[in-house]
Amino acid sequence: MTKNMTPSERRDAIIDALCKRRQDTIANLAHEFGVSVRTIKYDIEELTLAHPIETIRGRYGGGVKIADGYYAGRKYLKPSQKELLIKLSDELSGDDLAVMKSILRDFAL
């Protein structure tokens, strides 16, 4: 699938694959992208800095999964933003509270 990809292109493709599959093995990703298991592990290390990815220990190099509800390219609230909105929600009622809850539901991971 991925001959002559740059590391950046490969990492974007890995995130896309994980967003579709939700979980995969390191060995399968290495095979799919035509690189070594070590290269995929390094890619995953780099990707965990910007994406909610969890590694899973396993017999054949382990696996990797992406957080439920996470999709690449979607905007999410930072933890401090989420906390502030929750605090402000205590002062709201009616339609305003419903709107705030919809914001939190749509943008808080």
Image (spheres, rainbow, N blue to C red):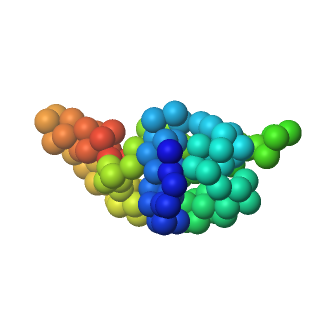
Q: Is residue 21 above or below residue 108?
A: above
Residue that sits furthest to the front in the current view: 3
Left or right: where 103 falls relative to 9: left
Residue 59 at what x, y percent from top left? 85, 39
**Which quadrant of the view contains residue 16?**
top left
- Residue at left offset 50%, top offset 51%: 2
Residue that appears at 61% across and 51% down:
34
Q: Is residue 109 left or right of residue 96?
A: right
Q: Is residue 58 visible?
A: yes
Residue ranking furthest to the left: 95
Viewer-proximal residue among 81 and 87: 81
- At x 40%, y 60%, the residue is 78
Residue 90 seen by the camera: no
Residue at horizontal 52 percent and vertical 33 percent from the top: 21
- Residue 31 point in image, percent of width and height: 65, 44
Q: Is residue 76 left or right of residue 56?
A: left
Q: Would residue 105 be found to the left or right of residue 98 on screen? A: right
**Image location (x, y in percent) of residue 81:** 35, 60
